[in-house]
Amino acid sequence: MTVMEQRDTYRPAPPPAWQPRTDPAPLLPDAEPYRVLGTPAADEAAAADPGLLRRLYAEVVRGRRYNAQATALTKQGRLAVYPSSTGQEACEVAAAMVLADQDWLFPSYRDTLAVVGRGVDPVEALTLLRGDRHTGYDPYAHRVAPLSTPLATQLPHAVGLAHAARLKGDDVVALAMIGDGGTSEGDFHEALNFAAVWRAPVVFLVQNNGFAISVPLAKQSAAPSLAHKAVGYGIPGRLVDGNDAVAVHQVLSEAVRHAREGNGPVLVEAITYRLDAHTNADDATRYRESSEVDAWRDHDPVLLLERELTARGVLDEDAIGAVREDAEAMAADLRARMNQDPEIDPMELFAHVYAEPTPQLLEQQAMLRAELEAEAHPQQEGTAR
């Protein structure tokens, strides 16, 4: 029998009874990113809830001004580093807005705007980035996990919290944010796999801004889209225009509702772009052309929303002016408070290391206390010697 004849007569064995059979078709994302602005769907959105659209606009404008002010503070030495999300404000704002009070947000290091959107004080959200040793805010008070600098480590935490809440019967959804570079980490795989198997109420939001620092997406993944990765785990993937604030809000709202109703996790990929460099320590001109950045400026999330809402009569010049004034007031308050030197007690370093301090920790504590006392009373030290 020839190979061709064998192929024609071969019949695969049926899968074992324990192997799940899932039709992948409903899990596949759309071929193109979902959009609202500039489409007939914008008519429905404007008619359904113009107040929501005005709030979205106000928040993206505030977010843009926050990014600009934080970047300026970095140049002035008030922040050690700031990973700007300029150009990604629509994703940041929508992520915070779609969550209920009892839900949890698990941000990455670039998601300061989403953290502030959950009610965290703008100064406290920057405390870690100014070089402080702790998060700067109470995660439990705002249901916001600490800003995560290690890539993707917050994703398994989000799954663990959501799974525990489901076992307890609590109405909690976790929304975990990550960049395209973070999807190359093992934690990303582990989190999605566990979330899918446990049907944990988690929404994974991938902000695909094109680069993992200087590495373009094409050198990270050969998948048709990052949203397609969801299919391999048996969960739905959604693809959305990440600069269309209304579209991102709609897709994330549906994903949160899907998870809350007990249907398991969702992976959402938002196609966006960071207009600024990776951080203030990065020279983006070394790996991308200015023409590429300029092309994305024409797809700016603030301008897209402002043009659409103005054309539909949802916004007028007075409303735009009021929003900008509010954003300037926020920036002025942030600037004034960040220019105040924080009062730091070095002895706090030992306060929350162990429930019962170890002998080594007590020894280090005593050494530091002695050094501080010697600095405070140098003449007494000289006399003692």
Image (spheres, helix red, strand yellow):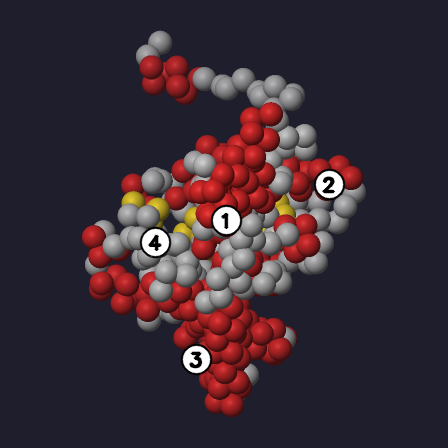
Among all residues in the image, which is located at the extreme bottom? 318
> Which residue is located at x 63 percent, y 50 percent?
139
Mark 2: give few (<14), some (14-19) or many (20+) Cα within 10 Å. some
Inter-mark Cα distance, 4 to 3:
28 Å
Q: Are marks 4 and 1 in contact (CB under 8 Å)?
A: no
Say left or right for 302 vs 196: left
Residue bearing mark 3:
307
> Which residue is located at x 49 percent, y 39 percent?
384
Q: Nearer the viewer, residue 34 or 190?
A: 190
Quarter holding the C terminus is top left
Q: Earlier in the sequence, mark 4 or mark 2?
A: 2
Say which of marks 4 and 2 sits in front: 4
Inter-mark Cα distance, 4 to 2:
36 Å
Inter-mark Cα distance, 1 to 3:
64 Å
Residue bearing mark 4:
278
Q: Nearer the viewer, residue 1 or 32?
A: 32
Q: Amino acid at mark 1?
A: His
Q: Secondary structure at mark 2?
A: helix
Q: Tell me: residue 183, above or below residue 81.
A: above
Q: Secondary structure at mark 1?
A: loop
Residue 276 visible in rendering = yes
Mark 3: give few (<14), some (14-19) or many (20+) Cα within 10 Å. few
What label sits on residue 180 in the rendered view? none
Q: Amino acid at mark 3?
A: Arg
Say left or right for 193 vs 165: left
Q: Are marks 2 and 3 in contact (CB under 8 Å)?
A: no
Q: Secondary structure at mark 4?
A: loop
What label sits on residue 166 in the rendered view? 2
What label sits on residue 377 in the rendered view? 1
Inter-mark Cα distance, 4 to 1:
45 Å
Q: Amino acid at mark 4?
A: His
| Residue 200 coordinates in the image, percent (x, y) | 65, 40
